[in-house]
Image: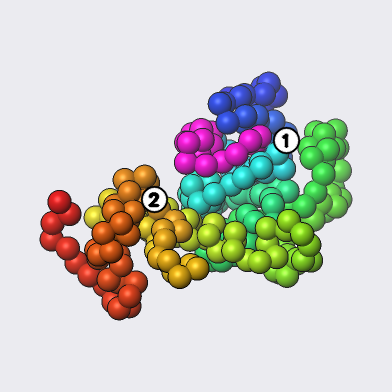
């Protein structure tokens, strides 16, 4: 796609802007298993077309789960292998914590700047390098600033439960993608005296867990109770 092309939209609400220095991909809406494919296609196409410097603007994202993190990790890895980089603009506190908790933050940098600097980049091509005052930092460094955010009513991070659940959902996504022979993954934890599934890679796996809870027996319950792995030959 030539420089200067107009916005390109997907069902997720993705637009692209081309500047002399990078491509800015702005996302609007929620990134979940149903919409992450759209983002994967956009970022994959940019990598295939050898756009080395990509800025992913997450300022318009209301929710981003493990499937979105998986897309980010894949794109960052491919860009890094090609000598490029992926920069996240205006990510939420939750996204920063997820990247930190899963130890993939070193793959990306974070830009806590103003989107208007894209216009400045187009108008100031002759300015010397280093004149841009945007704050660009490794994600692990930025995450330090939000490790202990102020506690307030309604703050999803104050109790840590939402962060833990989101991290566990990411674990299931990454495990399914990287463990050979894994058709599905789930995590069972005891909460309020009851074992429950807090993260599952798909509905089929979640239903298998519910069947075990209903009957009071099964490999997941046994593993949770005894702290060791169980292998079942037949799932029938």
- The residue that mark 1 highlights is 20
Q: Looking at the figure, which quarter contains the N terminus?
A: top right
Tell us which disc is closer to us: 1 or 2. Answer: 2
Asked which secondary structure carries label 1, the reply is: loop
Please tell me how crowded label 1 is: few (under 14), some (14-19), or many (20+) other residues with Cα within 10 Å: few
Front residue of this view, candidates 176 and 184: 184
- Report the side of 37 relative to 206 (left or right): right
- 165 vs 2: above or below: below
Q: Residue at x 69, y 31 (%)?
A: 17
Q: CA distance from mark 1 to mark 2?
A: 40 Å
Residue 23 shows in this picture: no
Front residue of this view, candidates 85 and 183: 183
- 37 vs 198: above or below: above
- Report the side of 211 relative to 91 (left or right): left
Q: Where residue 32 sits: x, y (%)? A: 52, 42
Region of the chain picked out in magenta, as a range: 27-45
- The residue that mark 2 highlights is 201
Residue 217: numbered disc: none
Q: How is the image coloured?
A: rainbow
Q: Residue at x 69, y 50 (%)?
A: 91
Q: Where residue 115 sits: x, y (%)? A: 79, 40
């Amino acid at each position: 796609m030539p420089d200067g092309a107009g916005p390109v939209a997907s069902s997720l609400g993705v637009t692209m802007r081309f500047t002399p220095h990078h491509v800015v991909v702005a996302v609007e809406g929620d990134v979940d298993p149903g919409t992450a494919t759209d983002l994967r296609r956009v970022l994959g196409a940019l990598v295939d077309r050898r756009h080395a410097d990509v800025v992913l603007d997450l300022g318009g994202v209301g929710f981003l789960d493990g499937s979105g993190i998986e897309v980010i990790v894949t794109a960052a890895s491919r860009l890094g292998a090609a000598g490029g980089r992926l920069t996240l603009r205006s990510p939420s506190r939750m996204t920063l914590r997820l990247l930190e908790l899963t130890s993939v933050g070193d793959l990306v940098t974070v830009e806590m700047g103003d989107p208007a600097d894209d216009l400045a980049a187009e108008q100031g091509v002759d300015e010397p390098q280093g004149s841009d005052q945007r704050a660009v930092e490794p994600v692990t460094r930025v995450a330090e600033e939000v490790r202990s955010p102020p506690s307030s009513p309604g703050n999803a991070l104050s109790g840590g439960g939402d962060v833990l659940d989101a991290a566990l959902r990411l674990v299931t996504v990454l495990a399914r993608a990287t463990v050979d022979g894994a058709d599905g993954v789930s995590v069972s934890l005891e909460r309020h005296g009851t074992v429950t599934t807090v993260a599952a890679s798909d509905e089929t796996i979640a239903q298998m867990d519910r069947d075990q809870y209903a009957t009071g027996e099964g490999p997941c319950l046994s593993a949770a109770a005894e702290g060791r792995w169980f292998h079942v030959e037949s799932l029938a």
